[in-house]
Structures are given as C-alpha cells and as structure tokens.
Image (spheres, rainbow, N blue to C red):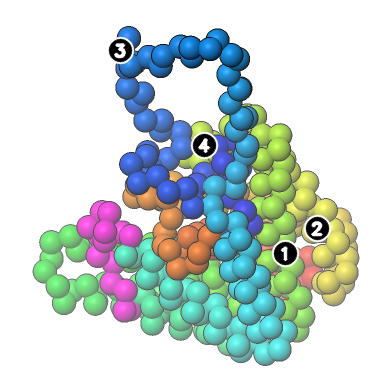
Amino acid sequence: MPIVPDVAASGDQDDDRGAARPSGPPFRDETPPVPPVYPAQKPQEPMTGAPQPAPAPQRKSAGRDLGAAIGVGVGLGAVIIASLFIQKAAFVGVIAVAVVVGLWELTSRLEERKGIKAPLVPLAVGGAAMVVAGYVRGPEGAWVAMALTALAVLVWRMTEPPDGYLKDVTAGVFAAFYVPFLATFVALMLAADDGPRRVLTFLLLTVVSDTGAYAIGWRFGRHKLAPRISPGKTREGLLGAVTFAMAAGALCMQYLIDDGSWWQGLLLGLAVAASATLGDLGESMIKRDLGIKDMGTLLPGHGGIMDRLDSLLPTAPVVWLLLVAFVGSG
C-alpha cells in the first residue's frame, strides 16, 4: 500500500503498527479474555468521599510511529520522483529492487508460518528479468519472462526431496505472478513517450485513494466493510477512497496525460479505488492466514515492502489497461 498513515480500530486499515503489545492478540477484533473480578479484588472506597476525576477520553491513534512513517515516506518519495524523471532506466532498477525485496519477504513468511519453501533464487532472478523484459519488449516480453520464471521454479525445486514439492512450486508460481508480473505493468507504463507522467498518475491516484479511505474512515467510519478480513475498513472509508480518487483522476487525466479528458479520469479514479481496496483486502487475507500483522520490518513505521505494495500491485494492470484504452500505448 502506498505511504499513508494507518488507522486504529475505528479507522480504515487493519493493523496497529507501533503498538507494543507482546502479550496482546494478533488482531484488533480478537479481544483478550477479561479475568473475573472477585470481591476481594475490588478497589477500596476513598476515605474522604471527595469526587474522583473522570478518566480522560481515549483518542484515536494512527497505531504506529507516525514520525518514522512520515520520514521514511518522504525519503522513498524523493527516490521515486528523482529516478522517475531523471532517468527511466533508474526507475526500472527501483522497480526491480522492490520486486526482489518483496519476494524475499513473502517467501520468508511462507516458510516461517506454513513451512512452504518457495525457491527464492529463480523467483528473484526471473522477477527482475520480468520487469526489464516488460520495459524493453512490451507485454510479449513480460509473458515470456513469466513463463520461463515458472518453469525455473519447477526445475529448481527438483533438486530437493519430493516431499512438499506440489505446495512449494504452487506457492512459487503464485509469488511470481503476484509480485513481479503485476509490477511489470508499471514498467509497461514507463515505456510510453509520456511514461513518467503515466507512472506518476498511477502512484498519485493510488496514494490519494488510500488517503481518502484513511481520512474519511478514521473520522466518519461506522459500518464495517469486511470485518472478517480487515476489521478496520469501513464503507464510509471506501466512499472516501472513491471520491478522492475520482477527483484526482479527473485532474491527472486533464493536465498530466497527453490527449486525456477529465471524464476519463473519473472512470480511472473509480477503477483505482476499487482495485486498491481489493489489493488491501487481498494482502490482509494472506496475513491473517499466516497469523502476522506485517510482511516485514524493513521500513520503520510502515512494516515491509510488501505492506506498501499491497494496493499498488493489483492497481498497476488496471491503470495500464485503461490508459491504453483511453489514449493509446504511447
């Protein structure tokens, strides 16, 4: 997911990073049992009979180190913008590095929590090659690289005992599709003549969608969107994501994209809000199945790389496809 603050239980996200609770429940919707209070444990009445001060009302919190989150976010944003507009090849390298780190986080968590050993070496090499092939050779290159990566996963795993072969290679092919293949669509956008502006539009709309979901959900969220998957997400937050993304989409298509129109931006923003929300829910589902809050700890205040890519990955092919339909491949 892009770099926006998370929310607490009444907000629009489902984690509580930064809250040090080593003995607490792994998720906010799983409250710990309250021990019974026996008469002997009741607090004594005050001797003076003076009125006791009322407890301070609880304040909503972002649930993590907001200062660290902002600092890391600004640093990452500077690297992305600099590489995007100074040299396209440098940004391809940024995508490849993010893909490799994301694959490492995902395969590590799968092995730790489920005992699934998806082979990292062919995934990392094939994932980086997939991004480069998509940028240089277009969609055909991305598909060929994806097929070769899947084949490499199957062959690499044959060097180990057959026990667990099917689940390991299945997880490997899933990881190849989920991380590098979806990220390749960012490289496809970048390859256009106005590629940096297309990628910037993609990033802005995803960030604005998540920010709208956070702001509206944190302030007005009352009705749960998917409580069994992400108890912090609300329908009000989804409405905020749609509203913010559609407004930003109209502006981006009108002023950033060659031959773009504001009405196309409305449709683009609506699609981004839907795909970004589904991406958040998808990774929340994976993390709940694994019994973890974050995929990693590499980014202070944010979790891991995969925790920042959750809404970006499924949104990339949606934005690429709609931009091609609206203004061509460039």
Badge 2: residue crowd in 10 Å (few <14, some 14–19, many ≥20): many
Badge 3: residue crowd in 10 Å (few <14, some 14–19, many ≥20): few
The verdict on residue 147 being magenta is no
Magenta: predominant secondary structure element? helix
Residue 186's place in the image compared with 165, above or below, is below
Identify the residue shown where x is 28% and y is 67%.
118
Which is more N-terminal, label 3 or label 1? 3
- On-image quarter of the N terminus: bottom right
Residue 105's place in the image compared with 258, above or below, is above
Identify the residue shown where x is 31% and y is 79%.
121
Residue 192's place in the image compared with 37, above or below, is below
Residue numbers of the magenta segment: 109-122
The x, y position of residue 288, in whole percent, is: 39, 45
Reading the image, the residue beneath label 2 is 248
The answer for how far apart the CA atoms under marks 1 and 4 are is 26 Å
Tell me if residue 144 can be seen.
no
The answer for how far apart the CA atoms under marks 3 and 2 are is 60 Å
Q: Is residue 84 left or right of residue 147?
A: right
The x, y position of residue 252, in whole percent, is: 82, 65
Which is more N-terminal, label 2 or label 1? 1
Which is more N-terminal, label 2 or label 3? 3
Residue lying at the far front of the rendered structure: 48
Task: Residue type at mark 4: give it.
Answer: Pro
The answer to whether the residue labelled 4 contacts the one labelled 2, judged by CB atoms less than 8 Å apart, is no
Looking at the rendered structure, the secondary structure element under dot 2 is helix
The verdict on residue 120 being magenta is yes
Reading the image, the residue beneath label 3 is 40
The answer for how far apart the CA atoms under marks 1 and 2 are is 8 Å
Please give the label number shown on residue 204. Answer: 1
Residue 58's place in the image compared with 155, above or below, is above
